[in-house]
Image (cartoon, helix red, strand yellow):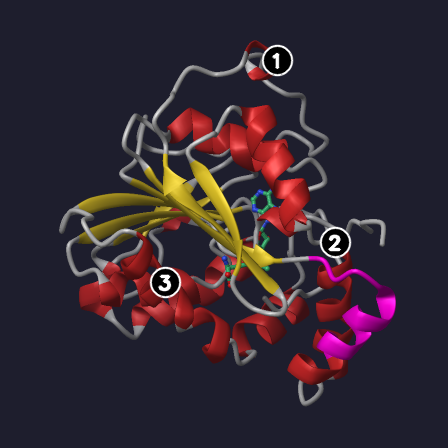
């Protein structure tokens, strides 16, 4: 079945609210456990870049499971980051280890040159060009950087996608059911992701199917020399905009200077992961 892309950013208040309120317990609770399993000898301290963090449910789970980790969490949607801030406001001790950054990828103002772990959950399937993720990984990885990327995987037929959507989002609101189906149709197959990784020269990463609807890309970056074909900055289809980053204050509210730039770009769908 051919891939059908969906909008990249999730900027509408209604869709952010629905996504932030959805029940992702079964998938999201698995990720920190799988991370520990795949990286048993990981360090106790790490700085983590989370690409497409949304309302930070996955990021927060990683922070709880790894108390020595600090997080730079990036998303292009102010609406989604608002829910991330709200969640962190309820956990001020945890919030001290977070910095939320509003910015479109590629081009977001990522604070560090490199990270110990690059995490990205349910972001890949949003990208019209998947190399945006792999190039961003290349850009912010050093030799030894861990990569952990769980995402949806595309079923082989529309009938199978419909059956999965019914099974896993049947009790969710209509908008989530519809958009979960859209996300399954926009996702990549493991074979496609393996080709993407070869093209990006990320040969140390492995792709595994981890459920009937998810895949996982994981591994350690060993080679940080970019393939020549990917060295030039890629043009972006998104309009240029001012980005501002937000350090979460203890109160959970961003300082006035960190108010999101308020993009007027509107997107329609919600994608349960
Ligand atoms: C399905 S959500 C996943 C959120 C979170 N990582 C999770 O697993 O629940 C995808 C997020 O990626 C963001 N996103 C999509 N394309 C983006 C881009 N090019 N730059 C920045 N954020 C993007 C969307 O706004 C959305 O918040």
Q: Quadrant of the N terminus?
A: bottom right
State the CA–CA distance, disc 1 to disc 2.
Answer: 25 Å
The location of residue 157, given as percent across then percent down, is: 84, 63
Local secondary structure at mark 1: helix
Q: Which mark is residue 186?
A: 2
N-terminal label among 2 and 3: 3
Q: Nearer the viewer, residue 114 or 29?
A: 29
Q: Which residue is mark 1?
A: 229
Comparing labels 3 and 1, the label whose residue is closer to the camera: 3
Q: Which residue is mark 3?
A: 34
The location of residue 250, given as percent across then percent down, is: 22, 62
Q: Crowdedness of circle 2 by 10 Å Cα count: few (<14), some, many (20+)?
A: many
The location of residue 144, given as percent across then percent down, is: 27, 32
Furthest-bottom residue in this view: 171
Local secondary structure at mark 2: helix
Name the quadrant containing residue 153: bottom right
């Amino acid at each position: 079945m051919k891939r059908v892309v969906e909008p990249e950013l999730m900027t509408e208040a209604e869709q952010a609210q629905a996504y932030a309120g959805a029940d992702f317990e079964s998938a999201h609770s698995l990720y920190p456990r799988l991370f520990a399993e795949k990286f048993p000898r990981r360090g106790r301290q790490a700085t983590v870049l989370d690409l497409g963090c949304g309302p930070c449910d996955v990021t927060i789970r990683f922070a709880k499971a790894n108390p020595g980790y600090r997080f730079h969490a990036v998303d292009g949607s102010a609406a989604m980051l608002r829910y991330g801030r709200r969640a962190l406001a309820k956990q001020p001790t945890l919030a001290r280890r977070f910095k939320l950054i509003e910015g479109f990828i590629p081009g977001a103002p990522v604070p560090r040159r490199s990270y110990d772990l690059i995490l990205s959950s349910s972001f890949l399937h949003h990208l019209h060009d998947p190399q945006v993720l792999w190039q961003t990984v290349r850009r912010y990885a050093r030799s030894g950087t861990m990569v952990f990327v769980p995402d949806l995987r595309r079923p082989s037929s529309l009938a199978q996608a419909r059956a999965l959507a019914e099974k896993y989002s049947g009790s969710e609101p209509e908008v989530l059911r519809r958009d979960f189906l859209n996300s399954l149709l926009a996702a990549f197959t493991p074979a496609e992701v393996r080709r993407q990784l070869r093209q990006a020269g990320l040969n140390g990463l492995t792709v595994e199917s981890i459920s009937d609807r998810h895949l996982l890309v994981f591994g350690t970056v060993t080679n940080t020399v970019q393939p020549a074909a990917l060295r030039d900055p890629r043009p972006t289809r998104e309009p240029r905009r001012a980005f501002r980053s937000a350090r979460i204050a203890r109160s959970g509210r961003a300082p006035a200077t960190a108010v999101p730039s308020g993009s007027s770009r509107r997107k329609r769908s919600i994608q349960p992961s």
